[in-house]
Image (cartoon, grey):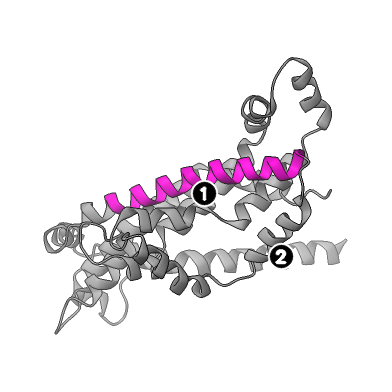
Amino acid sequence: MKNGKFIIFISYLILILGVITMIAPFLWMLVTSFMQDSQIFSYPPQFVPKPFITDNYSSVATKMPIMRYFYNSLLVAVLTTIGQVIIASMAGFAFAKLNFKFKEPLFLIILATMMIPPQVNIIPLFYVMKELHWIDTFQALILPGLFGGFGIFLMRQWFKSIPNALLEAAKIDGCNWFQIYYKVALPLALPALSTLAIFTFITSWNGFMWPLIVTNSDTIRTLPVALAGFKGSFRETIEWGQLMACAVITTIPAILIFIAGQKFFIKGIMNASVKE
């Protein structure tokens, strides 16, 4: 009994240390965004802003079109999320409940694409975008993110857990396959859809390499790329307080999305592991 309590204590201790390790950098970033640069590098370190200033946020807005970058990132993330949720749910339903030729080989090919590092696709994708004259356009930022093997796999696993008897009952009531997908399967797949939406939104919002390659102008640039440029825009000194303010603005939307969908996220991940 004592050994069991000790193991539980150690487990909670490890979890608490893990939480502190993960959240400490974000808290430091948030605190330093309200500090003067002289206080950030003071010794011993100060963990409470004195004085508490908000000038770093207003300075960021004057030095760069932060709201334009924010809008660009939000537009790309939202449209990418909507597109991938629709495509992945339709493909996942087809692989889970429909019978068609080469069904299993096609699904294996989709699974194989998950093993390919994204960096391998950058050069061919860039040439495709160039031939389509989509460099420095929203199409180049959005369309490559609409398709993903993980989303199709996640939705297939969820749809396979839906009893076939329920779908057969819908067919008896006169529903075709699309109506069954839209009116029966989708409402039951809300946790999986929410999980996929969270994953896709955060991945698209934090995307850096691809937006850096295919964007040239400020009118298209996204927040992560702008943040990297903001750090490199100062030739002599780096305004760390302003840099942290920009980083906070970049981070908060992804955190809010995760918190809002945390319940569905956990449920969706758990049910995605259902075995056939």
Q: Amino acid at mark 2?
A: Ser
User: Compared with residue 128, is residue 180 higher up or lower down, i.e. above or below?
Assistant: above
Report the quarter where the N terminus lies: bottom right
User: Compared with residue 237, is residue 250 higher up or lower down, i.e. above or below?
Assistant: above
Q: Amino acid at mark 1?
A: Ile
Dot 1 surroundings within 10 Å: few (below 14), some, or many (20 or more)?
many
The magenta segment? 71-98
The residue lying toward the viewer, choosing from 201 and 13, is 201
Q: In the picture provided, is 122 more to the left or to the right than 45?
A: right
Q: Position of residue 167 (x, y in %)?
A: 77, 27
Q: Which mark is residue 245?
A: none
Mark 2 falls on what kind of element?
A: helix
Mark 1 falls on what kind of element?
A: helix
Residue topped by disc 1? 198
Q: Pick whichever of labels 2 and 1 is earlier in the sequence.
A: 2
The residue lying toward the viewer, choosing from 81 and 38, is 81
Dot 2 surroundings within 10 Å: few (below 14), some, or many (20 or more)?
few
Residue topped by disc 2? 11
